[in-house]
Amino acid sequence: MQYRRKFHLPASIDPTSRRILLHIGTHYGAITMPADLGARVQQRLEQAEIAGPVVDHPRAKRWTFLTGPYRPEALTAAVSAELFRMYATVACTGSEVVLPSPDDEHTGYRTWIRPPEAATSRPPLTAVIEATRAVGARKTPAL
């Protein structure tokens, strides 16, 4: 499998759905958000030179950022509520992220915005959360 050999991602294939899955836990984390917010977050991460792999779900208009591992302490109730208001969700330990398959990419169902690199660099989950909060913060309207 290309994901294991080329990108060193411990992905597996679900025998029923034939989807390529990445298990979230000790080594990987993920955060999903609306595509327009994702584009701004991606730009901020690129400027900080810590951008990592991002999956696009065009029909749902959502992006999933693959990150360093999930740490429960990074997601307080207040931060979780703030992300919720921006329609962003952090994948918890034990969940799975579906990665683009060749068929997905051919049909445009699920594609890479930024594919993984062989070096397997991923931004820390906390950095993506902070970037999301920074660019997604609502501005107070002028009176």
Image: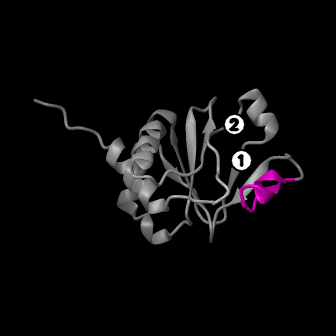
At 56% across and 41% down in the image, what residue appears? 63
Q: Which mark is residue 110?
A: 2
Using the image, determine if residue 104 lies above or below residue 1. Answer: above
Total numbered labels placed on residues in the image: 2
- Indicate the quadrant containing the C terminus: top left, top right, bottom left or bottom right: top left
5 within the magenta span? yes
Q: Residues within 10 Å of mark 1 (few under 14, many from 20)?
A: many
Using the image, determine if residue 72 lies above or below residue 52. Answer: below
Residue at the limit of the structure toward the left, as seen here: 143
Kind of residue at disc 2: Arg
Image location of residue 42, percent across then percent down: 47, 43
142 within the magenta span? no
Which residue was labeled with disc 1?
Answer: 99
Image location of residue 15, percent across then percent down: 89, 53
Question: Magenta segment, which residues?
Answer: 1-14
Q: Secondary structure at mark 1?
A: strand
At 72% across and 61% down in the image, what residue appears? 8
Give 59 or 77, whichever is nearer the viewer.
Answer: 59
